[in-house]
Image (cartoon, grey):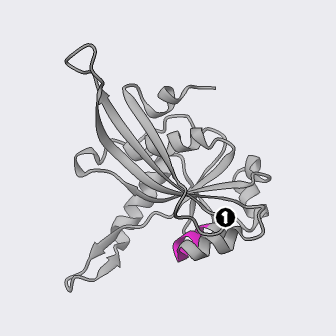
Amino acid sequence: MEDLEAVIGEGRALELSFDSETHELGAENWTASLYNLEDPEDENGRPTRELIASAVIVRVHRWDDDWLDSLDAASGDLATVGAAFEDMDLIESIDPEAAFVPGLVILDFVSVPEQHRGSKSSHALARGVAYIFRSDLVALIPAELSQDTTGQIIRDAPKEAALRSHWRRGGFLEIPGTSVLMLPLGGRTERQTP
């Protein structure tokens, strides 16, 4: 098995934090942050860290009785992701290794600072999270929100299509009949091509 540095890239650090205060039923709330590390000028100093990607993560155990309710209590989008994993025959047709995996990790919100967009740091973040939660399924719904001319927040369909393509290049596969993408268990650590 590869080590984490081989998965996220040399000179990077992945930090995960568990939020024990804000959870709904059985859902665990996590945050993940991916940093570039730069050597300190002083040989005894700590490396400087520059945030290059972050994500809000929700994790559930799909064999708990209330797993889907806990996602629904947190948000409708999370429940949509969870519902895509109810048909295990469909999931098994996409990834045979996923048939009996109880854990589901949802990348609920992925953010990349403007200056790091296009660097595939979001892919490295997703692979790192998958490496840490290697016994769990990993999924997301690509969504791009923008403001319309009146200032209302709306989903931006062209940007959303570009995001779907971005995540597919990162190894995610579409779950047919849904807007959900999943990262198959096999080949998670392989670097994807553009």
Give 21 or 11, whichever is nearer the viewer.
21
**Which image quadrant for residue 58?**
bottom right
Give 137 or 173, whichever is nearer the viewer.
137
Say few, some or many: other residues with alpha carbon within 10 Å of mark 1 (under 14 / 14 to 19 / 20 or more): some
158 w.r.t. 112: above or below: below
Give the residue displayed 49% in from the left and 26% down from the top: 6
Is 77 magenta? The answer is yes
> What percent of the width, then of the height, locates residue 108?
49, 61
In this orientation, does residue 178 appear? no
> Which residue is disc 1 drawn over?
26
Disc 1 secondary structure class: loop
Give the total number of marks visible in the rendering.
1
> What percent of the width, then of the height, locates residue 185?
66, 44
> Where's the C terminus, which quadrant?
top left
**Which image quadrant for residue 180?**
bottom right
Give the residue displayed 69% in from the left and 53% down from the top: 103
Going by the numbered disc 1, the residue's amino acid type is Gly
> Where's the N terminus, which quadrant?
top right
Is 38 magenta? The answer is no
Residue 67 located left or right of residue 157: right
Find the residue positioned furthest to the front: 21
What is the magenta segment's predominant secondary structure?
helix
Look at the image and give the residue range highlighted in magenta.
Answer: 75-81
104 w.r.t. 146: above or below: above
Give the residue displayed 37% in from the left and 43% down from the top: 120
In this orientation, does residue 50 appear? yes
Find the residue positioned furthest to the top: 43
> What percent of the width, then of the height, locates residue 158?
34, 69
Give the residue displayed 45% in from the left and 43% down from the top: 125
